[in-house]
Amino acid sequence: MSSQKQPAPVNVDEKSKDQQLAKDRSEPTGNFLTTDQGIRVEHTDDSLKIGARGPTLLEDFHFREKMTRFDHERIPERVVHARGAGAHGYFQVYESQAKYTRAKFLQDPSKKTPVFVRFSTVAGSRGSADTVRDVRGFAVKFYTEEGNWDLVGNNIPVFFIQDGIKFPDIIHAAKAEPHHEIPQAATAHDSFWDFVSLVPETMHMVMWTMSDRAIPRSLRMMQGFGVHTFRFIDEKNTSRFVKFHWKPLLGTHSLVWDEAQKLAGKDPDFHRRDLYEAIEQGDFPEYELGVQILEEADAAKLGVDLLDATKLIPEEVAPVMPVGKLTLNRNPTNFFAETEQVAFCVANIVPGIDFTDDPLMQARLFSYLDTQLTRLGGPNFAEIPINRPLAPVHNHQQDGFGRHTSNVGRANYFPNSLGGGCPFLASQQQGGYVHHPEQVSGKKVRERSASFNDHYSQAALFFRSLSAPEQEHLIDACRFELGKVETRAIQERVLEHFAKIDALLVSAVAEGLGLPAPKATPVTPKGPPASKALSMEAMKMAMPPSIKTRKIGVLVADGVDADELMAVRKELEAQGAKVKLIARRLGTVKASNGKDVPVDKSAMTTASVEYDGVFIPGGAASVATLKKDGESRHFVQEAYLHCKTVGASKDAEELLKACEIDPAAPGIVAGSKAGAGTALATAFSQALAKHRHWDRKDNTRVPA
Ligand code: HDE
């Protein structure tokens, strides 16, 4: 280091990124309308013409600028993960992780590192619906004092393919077919399943995408995974393998497929809206970061190759250790500036964390920056406010489209003496990034390691770890997706693979397709026969029951029993649930005590699929109106069909009867049994905390 002056230490706290972004915010309130050059505009509704009916003048700089800027508003959408929603927040470590990593942001529990998170679907375009069956991206940018670390993960812990060179193939196959660009945001088509049927390494992830994991209830209620094996490097340069996990503190929950499809029409922004509203209301989404740490010496004993991204390490084999918590507490100011322009990159890494030779990860190290050069219009996108690190940037990179930084001095090369040798190099002790000196030797080959060969064991482990209802949903999803495939030979080839996974799976899917089931020859999973952490149902059981942030639709009409409504609302809201009153029309309904009760939603603008449960308070006149109303009956029946909790006061049970719902069915909380007021509300919330009642046997009997 050849400078006299030492750089100041970098201090980052929860507010640092917001303060940095604030410098670029433009506040219209109290300001004149101006051109991009700051000229105040006197008139913006008519172009400059010769006479009111005459030709528009080229001289009209305001018109030309306004139109030009409009004409160029669009940038290319992401080639995958085009649809997304973002949020700001912070990450805080529970205790120092110095024994595993020297990453500075993982040392001090009092430090809050700012983050920006973008959740996404993979296959659909920017304007596609949120609730489609798909993988969800879970990308986190940590603005640490040592520079940006991006953990660009998914909500599924494994990937379809083992080598990144196949990524263009799987994505081409999964996205809309090239000749007619159909279907949008769906894998239920021939080309996807054609690829899958020819590439058995996809099987494990296919099981996950056909499971309820692929239709999360909320972005706030899904897990995240780093997928690849990374390295943690400690102060002594010891390397350990690490896998990253995010666990939502609200638990992991899903929609049901019929509900997801209806939501895609009723509210295509369902997940985006849910995230935005939760943050606005102060219900900040929280996720715990956990790590599975594996000593390098133990890796060989695992029975799976850590470099194979189609495999996971069961939590029974390597437990997930909690490391810290991510809290999302601020919505972006502007969607485009932040959520659209954010550029994540697997290669953005800080000292103390390192890569492995996973050939999928290695491909990603190239792809992200490469795609962003096109998407963000050149090499200077790291200067876009959302992408800027909080750590200072000094180097000899220069010029290019949209350059913001004005480098000082004439020495734009290294080494130099004209600039005093600056900027100078940092040793490892000064925070310089030193790659882990892994010893590698071998021949140049285009080959797949034999240790990557087993494609069915973990698919079987996943399927067998699911509860019976979860297995049923997975089978139904396969029947749906393959049912849309038009080429019989593709369906048959997929069944051949399913036969190697599980006998029930292959027979039930074959039955749905009207094809003979190939003889089942299921593999025996290596390692544990089942893994609890793979089943959302099993994980739910392990969590304290909660109805926090759950939405309850309360159906009301004139004559509703006001006292009961109050009691139920009070109890549910005390537990953190959100209660919405739904009536035929907006405004108010006249309660039984003569008071006007404000309505939140008109039945026409909402649907049961937007709620986690339904409650029908008493009041003879109100119940009589609802009973006669087809839409209200449909609301209740649909919620029932989707296995949601339905509550009814004693005199509202008539509505249940009109809906052909048995008040004794699981998850039906009826006043005649559960009592009234707070007692009824408590019973309702206990049932709601179970999330769904899969054990309803007469589902198909109830119309919806
Ligand atoms: Fe990505 N992926 N990916 N991916 N990925 C992109 O980068 C790619 C993979 C993931 O919200 C692209 O800026 C390759 C796994 C997320 O902005 C692109 C391979 C995982 C996001 C790209 C993979 C992911 C992306 C498109 C196989 C989970 C959205 C736009 C080798 C661990 C980030 C962009 C955001 C986005 C390439 C596989 C997660 C094309 C080549 C595995 C969450 O660069």
Image: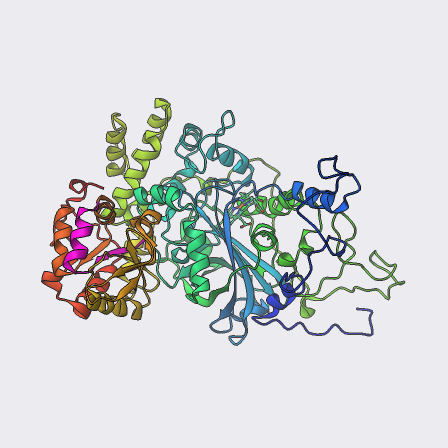
Identify whether 208 is placed above or below 111. Answer: above
Magenta part of the protein: which range?
Answer: 611-629
Q: 540 or 433, which lies in front?
A: 540
- Front-lying residue, 623 or 558: 558
Residue 646 found in image quarter: bottom left
Q: Quadrant of the N terminus?
A: bottom right
Q: Is residue 389 left or right of residue 590?
A: right
Q: Is residue 290 magenta?
A: no
As drawn, the residue found furthest toward the bottom would be 110
Is 624 one of the magenta-colored residues?
Answer: yes
**Residue at point 50%, 70% (across, down):** 92
**Count of numbered labels shown in the rendering:** 0
Q: In terms of depth relative to the viewer, which is nearer, 197 or 154?
A: 154
Work out whether residue 678 can be spotted: yes
Q: Residue furthest left?
A: 672
Q: Position of residue 694 (x, y in %)?
A: 22, 50
Percent from the top left, x then y, of residue 11?
64, 73
User: Which residue is found at the position 25% from the left and 28% from the top?
Assistant: 517
Query: Is the C terminus in the top left, top right, bottom left or bottom right quadrant?
Result: top left
Residue 370 in the image, given as x and y percentages of width and height: 65, 44
Is residue 529 rendered to the left or right of residue 20?
A: left
Q: Position of residue 274 (x, y in %)?
A: 41, 56
Residue at far right of view = 418
Task: Report if residue 287 is visible in the image.
Answer: no
Q: Is residue 544 above or below residue 156?
A: below
User: Looking at the image, which residue is at 84% across and 64% down?
Assistant: 421
58 lies above or below 239: above
Name the colour scheme. Answer: rainbow
Left or right: 350 as drawn, with respect to 476: right
